[in-house]
């Protein structure tokens, strides 16, 4: 499912956001145009793709946000909106009035939630998020990005119960963006993160809340009993993969994923189909994997990685390491 960024402006400045500097460099009026939206819709339709995610920045900042969603729905796409849930009352009322009647199988939301205490979230932002969840909670999944090892998930369980969110939490891991500064989990802390995650396992199991892993988690930091619990509580085998997500910016540039936002960025106009884009970035990621099996030395001989059960962690860690060494690798690595 490709990600289309309606804008790269945002309403908050999260300490872990690996797109933070990238977004800050964009023009304040950086919005996806109608012309480009129509082109991308045709492009995806011709590629046989009927699911699309709308991202930002904060996608609801786009002045035509609701109109864009309706257009995609009219073109028979399923639309998934990634949002902070922070909107003005006017924006929220408009979205609720126009989109509230759309069936949840056609329109869904993923709300990226921060712990109000650990991120010192202003009360006004917290109240805005609650208003959003009050309108759209039944079609919303919670998303939580881990950027510190002492994270807390109790507030997520509270939101799920209070607002009737889907009983599923998307878990992301904050990764570095090569050459930039942001808070992220270093490879030596992954075992601590996994142990902390399992602290909340009994509550999640009791509330029938399942976890879903975004890419970048290493499999080797869990023992067999912990893997067994995750297998039971993720609705199937937990994923420890890492591959191209395909993000398309408002200026029609395309890249593999946010941590690799500056790595081999291209124009969408260079490709004939979404499959061509995916194959291009799969080739680039394979090049990195050839140079380094994973984020740990033992990844080179890991059976999990050889069997395709684990990718060996996020590529951004490897690229960051390459940038700090003598340039002795394949030229493609440094672009």
Image: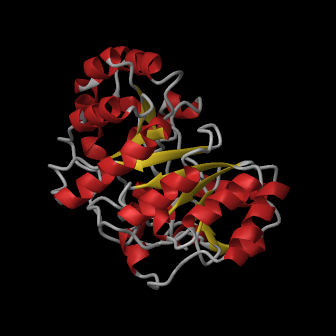
The image shows residue 303 at horizontal and vertical percentages of 51, 28
- Does 114 sit above or below residue 271? above
Please report the residue visible at 50 percent of the width from the left and 46 percent of the height from the top.
Answer: 109
The image shows residue 110 at horizontal and vertical percentages of 47, 46
176 displayed left or right of 152: right
The image shows residue 254 at horizontal and vertical percentages of 63, 68
61 displayed left or right of 195: right
Please report the residue visible at 44 percent of the width from the left and 55 percent of the height from the top.
Answer: 83
Residue 16 showing in the rendered view: yes
Nearer-the-camera pick, 102 or 39 = 102
- Does 231 sit above or below residue 318? above
- Does 220 sit above or below residue 39? above
The C terminus sits in image quarter: bottom right
Nearer-the-camera pick, 77 or 247 = 77
Please report the residue visible at 44 percent of the width from the left and 64 percent of the height from the top.
Answer: 91
228 displayed left or right of 49: left
4 displayed left or right of 167: right
Task: Answer with the quarter of the image where residue 57 lies.
Answer: bottom left
């Amino acid at each position: 499912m490709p990600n289309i960024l309606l804008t790269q402006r945002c309403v908050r400045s999260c300490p872990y956001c690996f797109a933070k500097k990238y977004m800050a460099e964009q023009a304040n009026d950086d919005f996806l145009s109608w012309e480009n939206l129509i082109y991308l819709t045709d492009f995806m339709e011709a590629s046989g793709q009927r699911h699309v995610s709308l991202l930002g920045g904060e996608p609801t900042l786009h002045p035509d946000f609701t109109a864009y969603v309706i257009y995609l729905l009219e073109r028979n796409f399923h639309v998934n909106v990634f949002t902070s849930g922070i909107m003005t009352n006017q924006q929220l009322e408009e979205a609720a009035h126009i989109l509230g009647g759309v069936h949840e199988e056609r329109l869904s939301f993923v709300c990226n939630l921060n712990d109000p205490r650990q991120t010192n979230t202003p009360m006004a932002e917290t109240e805005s998020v609650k208003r959003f969840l009050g309108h759209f909670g039944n079609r919303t999944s919670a998303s939580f990005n881990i950027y510190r090892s002492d994270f807390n998930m109790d507030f997520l369980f509270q939101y799920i119960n209070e607002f009737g969110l889907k009983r599923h939490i998307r878990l992301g891991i904050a990764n570095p963006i090569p050459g930039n500064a942001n808070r992220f989990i270093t490879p030596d802390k992954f075992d601590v993160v996994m142990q902390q995650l399992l602290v909340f396992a009994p509550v999640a199991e009791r509330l029938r809340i399942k976890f879903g892993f975004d890419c970048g988690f290493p499999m080797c930091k869990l023992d067999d009993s912990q893997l067994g619990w995750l297998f039971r509580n993720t609705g199937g085998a937990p994923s420890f993969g890492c591959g191209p997500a395909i993000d398309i910016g408002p200026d029609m540039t395309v890249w593999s994923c946010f941590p690799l936002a500056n790595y081999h960025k291209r124009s969408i106009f260079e490709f004939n189909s979404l499959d061509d884009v995916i194959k291009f970035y799969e080739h680039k990621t394979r090049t990195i994997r050839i140079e380094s099996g994973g984020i740990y030395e033992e990844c080179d001989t890991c059976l999990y990685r050889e069997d395709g059960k684990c990718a060996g962690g996020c590529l951004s860690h490897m690229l960051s390491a390459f940038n700090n060494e003598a340039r002795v690798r394949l030229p493609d690595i440094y672009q």
